[in-house]
Image (cartoon, rainbow, N blue to C red):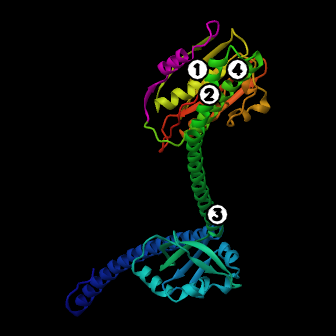
Amino acid sequence: QMPRNGEFGQVTNAFERLAVTVTERTASLRAENMARAKVEDELRDQMDRVREAEERFRLLVEVCPSGVCVVDESGTIILVNRTVDDLFGYERDELLGHPVETLMAERLREGHESLRLAFMQDRSRRLMGAGRDLVGRRKDGTEVAVEVGLCPLTLDGTPVVMASIVDVTERRRERAKLAQYASRLEDTNAELARTNAELEKFAYVVSHDIKAPLRGISSVATWIAEDFGTVVDDEARENLDLMLERTSRLGRLIDGILAYSRAGRAEHASERVTTGSLISDVISSVAPPEEMSVRLFGDFPTVSYNETQLRQIFQNLIDNAIKHLGRPDGEIVITCEEGDDEWCFFIRDNGVGIPERHFERIFELFQTLRPKDKSGTTGAGLAITRRIVEANGGTIRVSSTEGKGTVFSFTIPKVRPPVPAGAAEDDG
């Protein structure tokens, strides 16, 4: 090794120090370059992922069933999907780069810019057009009712707004129809209320103005029968008896009219009714023939109902079954089944049955399947029963097989309707 004295030594030492510095600097640059390359690779990967995400976004927008329109902060359309093209009748390039107001009805364009700027200041998801008329304009100048949802997002690093556009023309048309139907229903209900009021007034007139002279006729016929019964011949006596029977029946018809007019109209408070006990009381009150079996089978619930109304329902149905059983030793069985929302009661008999063609007729006022002189009824009982049941939110049905028997069934909702209604008594 050569001595490093003098100038040569100084140069050598300086060169060595420089070599060390260069080596260290080279290593540092190499590390920095590797780190930079790694960052650049990560950045490229991230950009690739962003581009892939944006491409997926564009594909999703394109296949979205709702119209999608993306605008930048200036309100310029930068992206639309096929649904928007079809809804508004434009080609894609006729919309891209144009203001979003192109798609709006002319009368709405003037004030839209201020709304758009306000939205850019408060970028939050919101729904436009809900509960009010928002109208778009097609290329041909026709208008379309739309509902628009706004969603702020970032696309290609730029803040934008995505608008979802739904054609609500059919929805609004159906809503208008429903409103029209509701108005008609309201008018019909009002007319029905007037008709019911007139029916009730008529029933009172019939009850008070006709029953008074009818009672007079009946009284006179009774006096004649009592005073001259031994004097008149058999034919005259038979005619007097017929007059008494007819006036009595006419009185029951008048009572039936009054009862029917009240059924389902007069409000009665509901109460807790133990149906099993009530039905047993009804069976005792109608006093079926000794050889006839009328019984309950199974469990019976406690329901919320007006007791007078419910008693009238069971009395009419059980009395009807007894009168039309057609055999002295028949059987009537009352049962109940529980449903999800209601109780269903059944009154079954093994009588002569009812032809199916008469199923609806028997629920009409003053309709009977036997001559009224022989049946002893006015034909109002089932009509009144149906009116009470339906006024309380239930339904009543009949099924029957001729020669095997009949089943009447009616339902009581577990939840009471808001306006309970009552009815007057009837003889069945």
Q: Which residue position holds label 4?
A: 324
Q: Give the residue at mark 1.
A: 335
Q: Looking at the picture, which amino acid does disc 2 mark?
A: Val
- Which mark sits nearer the N-terminus, 2 or 4? 2
> Height in image: 292 above or below 400?
above
Question: Which residue corresponds to mark 2?
Answer: 220
Q: Is residue 273 magenta?
A: yes
Specify the segment rendered in magenta.
Answer: 270-292
Is tag 3's residue or tag 1's residue first in the polypeptide sequence? 3
The residue at which mark 3 appears reads as: 177
Which secondary structure, mark 4? loop
Q: Distance between the Cα atoms at labels 1 and 2?
A: 48 Å
Pointer 1 with pointer 4, Cβ within 8 A: no
Element type at marker 1?
strand
Q: Are marks 4 and 3 in contact (CB under 8 Å)?
A: no
Q: Is residue 10 left or right of residue 143?
A: left
Residue at 60 percent of width and 39 percent of height: 210
